[in-house]
Amino acid sequence: MKKINLLLAAASSMLVLASCDSYLDKLPDDRAELNTIEKVQNLLSTAYPDHSPDFGLEMSSDNVTDNGRAFVAQPSQERYYRWETVETTGNDDPRSIWSSTYTAIGTANEALAALDKLPQTEQTKGLRAEGLLCRAYCMFQLANTFCMAWNPDKANEYLGLPYPKVAGVSVDTRGTLAELYANINADIEAALPLLNDSYLGVPKYHFNARAAYAFAARFNLYYMNYDKAIEYANKVLGSNAKAVVRDYSSYIGLAGVADIANKYVQSGENANLMFVTSVSQAGRAPTSGSYRRFAHNYTLTLHETYWASMPWSNGEGSKNTTLYLARLLYGNTQQIRFPKLSEFFEVRDKISGTGLPHIVDAVFTTDETLLVRAEAYALKKDYTKALADMNVWAQTNCADKRGSGLRPTFTETSINNFVNAVDTVPAVVLSDLARGFKKQMVPQGFTLEAGTQTNMLYIILQMRRIETMFQGLRFIDVKRYGIKISHTVDGEKTPLAFEPGDLRGAIQLPQDVITAGLQPNPRKDN
């Protein structure tokens, strides 16, 4: 079997593979002379992946549907939508995500190795925390993309991913999902006691303390350590969550797309905890005609997302919904979006007008952390505290009154009455009128009680769906909860169905990696 080198892919345009150790002989910059704190700090600023899984995960989710063959799609877009292997090599494709993320891990490992040789100070402790968190975050992103959802019953059966920890030393086997999550957890737990924001010049583009705890909260939610998820979320949200989450009422008076997009990614917005910039078409896809076939369209907006019949909306479009975001949508019938993830184009050649599309992704926010905590409380059956967080979400996401609609105040009774009155969505949707938020769930590795617990989580998952739209996290929730979704395809009689525990939830590895000897993700027919 070929030697697999996962660390230093970006030294050339090649994938993160090599048949020998030549890429480890020397580094393309001065990393071999990492003999000062300043050099290590500068290096760590590049230990964040510059390609994102957002686009592919979003296309795989139920946040998009087929507008028909009359519209254009990109090849990888359709492959993601069909849950098929993506073999193209664009900015948002598996090869780029794999290469970028493992390169960032290699960078973090180089920095951590250099820190071992420097005098230990409070700043080096903080830098070590950042290096460990960068490595853990990169592996978490790869796990969410290329692995099955965490399931304690199958974690020793499901494939993990190579987890390099030593600078310049490759890991050539995948191991198990149990080993992968244990390694991520170990890095997070080692980092948290060392956190130190004092050296950060631009904190929100690094793992500052609040971002670190938000990451730890989300990871532990997925890992089913609900007490830890709550503990770490508390450190982010403090004693008054309403004071630190985003107040969407302040967006209503903005002039349009550019103002909303800029405000959403302002460093001064307290709700924003950490940004990661990526080369990606994820900001372009919701508006470009070149991506119009598979998109978040009017049908989904009306029946499943912003305008769907929910406690904050009567299901009549934007007419009487109290949801602020329902009045901040732009686009056309085929492509509707709230402009949170817009494109920032980097011009490389002014004469030809060519360059690279970028997104600034708010990967951790207090808004999502609030819902992490609400979900953890609901899973622990601490309904009083779950309701408190749900009501904070309602107070900051919904107007007090809009038309004939009133902002909801959630109680166990109101949630049970609302959800019980709604029909369950069929596993395969054949009619738009059958669409809705109440989709069949077969949670992976845990169970839900019928009644209050299940009903409360239906609402929380819908809040998460709205909050994380366009960022790919919905597909991870689909995987975690075994939500039955289907994708219609124009010209094909039967929609494509995605089942609980569907192996296609683990996106296939890049072909180059498989060719070099790494075990591919299994499929139902192999």
Image: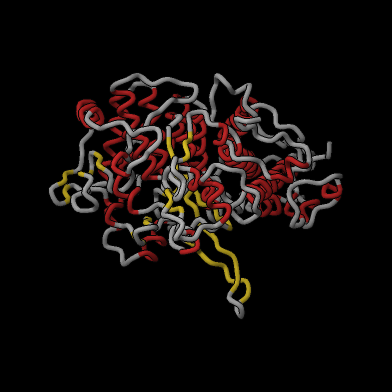
| Above or below, 268 relative to 461 | below
What percent of the width, then of the height, locates residue 181? 60, 29
Which residue is drawn at the image coordinates 73% and 40% (left, top)? 514
Residue closest to the far left: 404
Residue in front for this viewpoint, 142 or 247:
142
| Image quadrant in which the N terminus is located | top right
- The image's colouring method is secondary structure
Whether residue 362 sits left or right of residue 301 in the image: it is right
Q: How many marks?
A: 0
Which residue is drawn at the image coordinates 47% and 36% (left, top)? 497
The quadrant in which residue 163 appears is top right
Residue in front for this viewpoint, 174 or 426:
426
Which residue is drawn at the image coordinates 29% and 49% (left, top)? 302
Residue closest to the far bottom: 351
The quadrant in which residue 5 appears is top right
Work out whether residue 268 can be spotted.
no
Work out whether residue 233 can be spotted.
yes
Whether residue 97 sits left or right of residue 241 in the image: it is right
| Above or below, 351 relative to 98 | below
What percent of the width, then of the height, locates residue 95? 66, 49
What percent of the width, then of the height, locates residue 481? 44, 29
Residue in front for this viewpoint, 11 or 241:
11
Which residue is drawn at the image coordinates 36% and 33% (left, top)? 426
Whether residue 379 sits left or right of residue 38 in the image: it is left
Residue in front for this viewpoint, 522 or 351:
522
What percent of the width, then of the height, locates residue 462? 35, 38
| Image quadrant in which the C terminus is located | top right
